[in-house]
Image: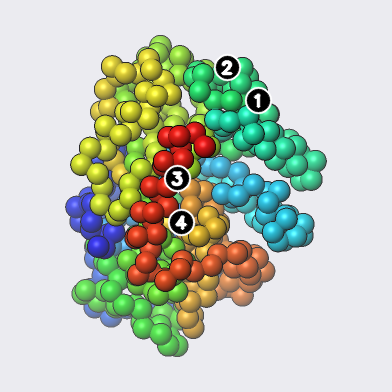
């Protein structure tokens, strides 16, 4: 089933707290007829819009196509957490790839955060860059490993923005007794994701980018130039960037072989008032070590935005709020009688190794996807390095493209049953505490 339409109405942002608190522009015109461009980008999320902005500023003619709206997908509905690094411990990346490549990847991830901070400050200050992301572990062994990672980052890279926390220290920040300890990373941050996407789209247009919404791409023809076909028109371009991530419905087999769509869900409580201080003592975001991860933070109006993944198919469950409430209350029993005013879901892309998949998938065609929960910063950086590659500066793209990201066994055809098996197994482990 096509993730573009499986759970959402065409051209409509989900009924999220983000959409309710964003000044949304009118819908842009769809693509009609024949057009030419230096670069055509499929997908108007962080990846596509960042690439478009940089290319336009370099003097390239850029057309961006989105099946729905700019920021409609994961870019406009995610948890808003700007994490450090990747969905791997940096120690493990160094063991796998060697110290030099691991250092280059760390530097790239740090640049990704800096880029996001600067773009947000310039084009979407209302998205509110707020420093601080805490991480909680459930077992002492996980806590020891996390503290070892913090020490490694400080010793090896001079990254001194993480404070390791024992159980009591973490509880001073996150008011629950369930965690064995964790850390607080003040080099990480959280933002309002949809406001950022809307601001980034406006900045791209101001630089000369043309964005067409309601323009699903049905086919990308290989060749020089490349032809990108929609229902009512097409674009002929020297270069194409595929930036649909989890919402790219098998448009390219090489992308589909490495990137699996998976759903995540978020609920927003009613404003908590003083009760918010009994949940979080500081305005930081939080994630934890469950495989079916919990992630949460306070909104600017003191709601708890609480997210987690527990869906084994592309279809949303009938009761998103019920599952979220159960997870939320297990951490914070004081919220048992608090109402959820908004619930929504979205689709992200994951890979076998949970590392991003940047690829050359055909002559003149690049792809960046599979950010696996670290996309708020890394997806925009992927857009940057693909833009650089098109402009002839391939060093950073080549570093990212060498990440170990194998195909899913059986390719796209067998991704859904693999997802069901994996999520069922790891959800069971989470519940059993093993």
Q: Residues under labels 2 and 3: Cα distance?
A: 29 Å
Task: Identify the residue at image location x=68%, y=51%.
Answer: 92
Residue pointed to by mark 4: 350
Q: Earlier in the sequence, mark 2 or mark 3?
A: 2
Q: Is residue 237 above or below residue 74?
A: below
Badge 1 element: strand
Nearer-the-camera pick, 401 or 273 = 401
Badge 4 element: strand
Percent of width and height locating residue 378: 54, 53
Percent of width and height locating residue 398: 63, 69
Q: Residues under labels 4 and 1: Cα distance?
A: 29 Å
Label ID, residue 44? none
Question: Are circles 1 and 2 on residues that touch, CB within 8 Å?
Answer: yes
**Residue that sits furthest to the right in the current view:** 155
Q: Earlier in the sequence, mark 4 or mark 2?
A: 2
Q: Residues under labels 1 and 2: Cα distance?
A: 10 Å
User: How are the colours assigned in the image?
Assistant: rainbow
Label ID, residue 172? 2
Label ID, residue 165? 1
Q: Is residue 339 above or below residue 44?
A: above
Q: Earlier in the sequence, mark 3 or mark 1?
A: 1
Percent of width and height locating residue 39: 44, 73
């Amino acid at each position: 089933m096509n993730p573009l339409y499986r759970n959402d109405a065409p051209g409509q942002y989900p009924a999220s707290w983000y959409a309710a608190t964003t000044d949304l522009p009118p819908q842009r015109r769809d693509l009609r007829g024949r057009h030419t461009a230096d670069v055509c980008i499929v997908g108007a999320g962080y990846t596509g819009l960042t690439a478009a902005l940089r290319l336009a500023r370099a003097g390239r003619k850029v057309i961006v196509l989105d099946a729905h709206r700019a920021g409609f997908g994961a870019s406009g509905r995610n948890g808003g957490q700007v994490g450090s690094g990747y969905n791997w411990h940096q120690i493990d990346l160094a063991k796998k790839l060697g110290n030099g490549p691991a250092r280059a990847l760390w530097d790239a991830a740090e640049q990704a955060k800096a880029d996001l901070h600067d773009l947000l400050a310039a084009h979407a200050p209302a998205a509110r860059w707020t420093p601080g992301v805490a991480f909680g572990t459930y077992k002492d062994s996980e806590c020891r490993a996390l503290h070892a990672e913090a020490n490694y980052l400080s010793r090896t890279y001079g990254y001194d923005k993480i404070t390791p926390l024992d159980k009591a220290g973490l509880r001073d920040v996150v008011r629950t007794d369930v965690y064995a300890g964790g850390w607080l990373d003040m080099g990480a941050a959280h933002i309002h994701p949809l406001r950022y996407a809307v601001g980034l789209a406006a900045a791209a247009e101001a630089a000369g980018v043309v964005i067409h919404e309601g323009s699903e791409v049905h086919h990308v023809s290989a060749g020089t130039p490349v032809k990108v076909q929609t229902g009512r028109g097409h674009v002929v371009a020297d270069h194409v960037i595929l930036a649909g991530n989890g919402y790219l419905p098998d448009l390219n087999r090489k992308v589909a072989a490495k990137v699996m769509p998976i759903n995540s869900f978020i609920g927003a409580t009613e404003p908590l008032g003083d009760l918010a201080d009994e949940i979080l003592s500081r305005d930081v975001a939080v994630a934890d070590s469950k495989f079916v991860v919990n992630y949460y933070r306070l909104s600017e109006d003191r709601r708890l935005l609480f997210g987690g993944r527990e869906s084994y198919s592309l279809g949303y469950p009938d009761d998103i709020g019920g599952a979220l409430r159960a997870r939320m209350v297990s951490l914070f029993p004081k919220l048992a009688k608090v109402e959820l005013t908004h619930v929504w879901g979205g689709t992200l892309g994951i890979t076998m190794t949970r590392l991003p998949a940047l690829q050359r998938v055909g002559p003149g065609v690049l792809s960046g996807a599979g950010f696996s929960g670290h996309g708020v910063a890394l997806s925009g950086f992927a857009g940057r390095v693909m833009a650089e590659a098109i402009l002839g500066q391939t060093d950073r793209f080549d570093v990212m493209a060498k990440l170990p990201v194998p195909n899913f066994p059986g390719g796209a055809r067998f991704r859904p049953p693999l997802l069901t098996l994996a999520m069922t197994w790891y959800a069971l482990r989470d519940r059993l505490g093993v």
